């Protein structure tokens, strides 16, 4: 596996020798393989300068040189923290030189002279072997750093701090040590606008980046991550858009970018820059994916907590309003009772004073209107006072048929084990639909309740064999105050259903029967394990009368 990596990636070698002819010959032979690139220098200071500014996989050095010899140069780079392979390539063959070289951290020793072809073949082999071992060591160290980061990131995200502080700490930690060069996490709102940006290593360009993003622009790696499959996107330096504020950072570096997604919700992206040796490695990509998943899960969990807190505040406010409204209605009813008593007395007075009867009639209508408003307020206030829950449609229907008397009218259903996620007043909705059918259908003998599962939604159907609803009234029947009574039932039925994203409409054929369809979102219903839904067009079995 290591050899395959070396064959696919060019090996960069720094060669130090004070003899120009030796530098040229060595470079020509090593670069013949096509897999090795050699930078040649003839002075120690030039070698140190290149080491500080460029990445190399191996270093070849002569022994006898002015300023300092090869072993002194080896000591210098080891003390400076460079751990790349060091090959001492010299004409000196004394045993003490070899011992000193290995004691100070040399990787290989190779003596000049002899058959040129054999000599450079051996040097090429040693360079390839040393570079392979060095890259494998770097990969292990890097992956271990990322693995340690995963543990730290997980602990940080599950801490008690605010999510903003957590995500900033994650960026800071990931860009420290031998992890990533720079890190950015960008979160989006539901309308795809920018919610927040967290970063480490981009301090000089962060303002420019935020302005770029808030203007509606997206970096090329971000677009690809959001549009493509949920796997890391590898962005090579040549693929970076020149208009991107991070263009200069990506020159010579690769970027790994992945969307932060959990439970089919995309919260944003995470992007890091790193060496090409690591970016295209399968293990590296797997580790980065795991990192993105950990962060996405934490953001998802935080979002749920936010919704939970908002719901608790809303429920608390709703309960307070419920108490206030109940007290207010109680006081109004007491006053209304007094008004009703006065109304009755006035009716008696109208027998002897006929000219006041019309005014008393107006007063009576006003009192009735207030009573209707109180009834409406009492029912409407209960909507949404409790959290939605999973309710069995079959259990609701069976409860209705047991607790209500419908005479000779048959109540048939074939809903199987369907449960709906809705307000606890859903049972009253079904009761109202049945009572409306009986009250307005005139000749109703059978009410059928069934369920149809469509591609993107489920439909609960309540239909009867009465006179139906005229086409011009199909929408008006859901208006408050419409109908022979108050129109209250169908009005608040639509309101209750809307809490959990359901819709109701009347789709029956006039004079053939009313048909109410309640459309339920895909996530708003479920089937009990092992249950089946009967075909609504098939004969239905009576579950009670």
Image: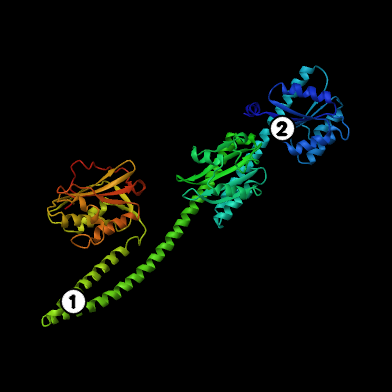
Q: Position of residue 472 (x, y in %)?
A: 21, 52
Residue 81 image-quadrant placement = top right
Q: Position of residue 88 (x, y in %)?
A: 80, 29
Residue in the image at 22% along x and 60% along y: 482
Nearest the viewer among 476 and 288 is 476
Sequence-earlier tag: 1 or 2: 2
Nearest the viewer among 431 and 198 is 198
Kind of element beneath mark 1: helix
Q: Position of residue 484 (x, y in %)?
A: 18, 61
Q: Badge 2 is on which residue?
A: 57
Farthest-out residue, front? 355
Q: Quick check: 332 left or right of 319?
A: left
The quadrant the N terminus occupies is top right
Closer to the camera: disc 1 or disc 2?
A: 1
Residue 252 image-quadrant placement = top right
- Label placed on residue 359: 1
Q: Position of residue 346 (x, y in %)?
A: 17, 80
Kind of element beneath mark 2: loop
Farthest-out residue, left? 351
């Amino acid at each position: 596996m290591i050899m395959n990596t070396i064959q696919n990636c060019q090996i960069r070698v720094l060669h130090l020798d004070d003899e120009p002819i030796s530098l040229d010959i060595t470079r020509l032979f090593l670069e013949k393989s096509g897999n090795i690139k050699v930078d040649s220098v003839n002075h120690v200071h030039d070698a140190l300068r290149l080491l500080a500014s460029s990445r190399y996989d191996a270093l070849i050095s002569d022994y006898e040189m002015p300023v300092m010899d090869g072993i002194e140069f080896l000591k210098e780079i080891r003390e400076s923290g460079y751990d790349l392979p060091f090959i001492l390539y010299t004409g000196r063959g004394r045993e003490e030189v070899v011992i000193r070289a290995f004691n100070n951290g040399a990787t290989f020793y190779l003596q000049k002279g002899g058959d040129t072809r054999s000599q450079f073949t051996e040097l090429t082999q040693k360079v390839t072997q040393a570079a392979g071992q060095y890259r494998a060591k770097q990969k292990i160290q890097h992956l271990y750093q990322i693995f340690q980061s995963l543990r730290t990131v997980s602990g940080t995200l599950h801490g008690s701090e605010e999510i903003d502080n957590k995500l900033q700490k994650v960026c800071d930690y990931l860009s420290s040590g031998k992890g990533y060069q720079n890190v950015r996490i960008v979160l989006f709102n539901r309308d795809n606008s920018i919610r927040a940006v967290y970063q480490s290593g981009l301090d000089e360009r962060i303002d420019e980046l935020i302005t770029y993003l808030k203007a509606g622009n997206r970096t090329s790696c971000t677009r690809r991550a959001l549009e493509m499959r949920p796997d890391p996107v590898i962005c090579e330096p040549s693929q970076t858009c020149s208009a991107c504020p991070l263009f200069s950072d990506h020159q010579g570096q690769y970027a790994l970018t992945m969307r932060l997604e959990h439970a089919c919700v995309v919260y944003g992206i995470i992007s890091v820059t790193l060496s090409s040796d690591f970016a295209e490695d399968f293990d590296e990509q797997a580790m980065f994916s795991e990192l993105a998943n950990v962060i996405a899960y934490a953001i998802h969990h935080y979002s749920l907590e936010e919704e939970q807190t908002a719901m608790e505040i809303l429920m608390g406010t709703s309960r307070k309003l419920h108490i206030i409204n109940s007290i207010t209605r109680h006081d109004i009813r007491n006053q209304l009772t007094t008004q009703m008593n006065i109304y009755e007395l006035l009716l008696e007075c109208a027998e002897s004073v006929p000219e006041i009867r019309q005014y008393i009639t107006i007063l009576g209508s006003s009192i009735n209107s207030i009573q209707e408003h109180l009834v409406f307020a009492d029912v409407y206030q209960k909507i949404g006072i409790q959290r939605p829950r999973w309710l069995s449609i079959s259990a609701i229907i069976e409860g209705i048929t047991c607790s209500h008397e419908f005479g000779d009218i048959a109540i048939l259903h074939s809903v199987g084990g369907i449960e709906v996620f809705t307000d606890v007043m859903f049972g009253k909705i079904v009761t109202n639909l049945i009572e409306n059918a009986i009250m307005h259908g005139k000749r109703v003998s059978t009410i059928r309740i069934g369920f149809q599962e469509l591609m993107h939604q489920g439909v609960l159907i309540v239909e009867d064999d009465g006179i139906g609803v005229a086409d011009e009234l199909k929408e008006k029947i859901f208006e408050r105050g419409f109908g022979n009574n108050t129109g209250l039932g169908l009005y608040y039925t639509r309101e209750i259903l809307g809490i959990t994203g359901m819709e109701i409409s009347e789709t029956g054929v006039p004079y053939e029967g009313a048909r109410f369809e309640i459309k339920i979102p895909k996530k708003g219903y479920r089937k009990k394990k092992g249950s089946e839904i009967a075909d609504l067009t098939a004969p239905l079995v009576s579950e009670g009368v």
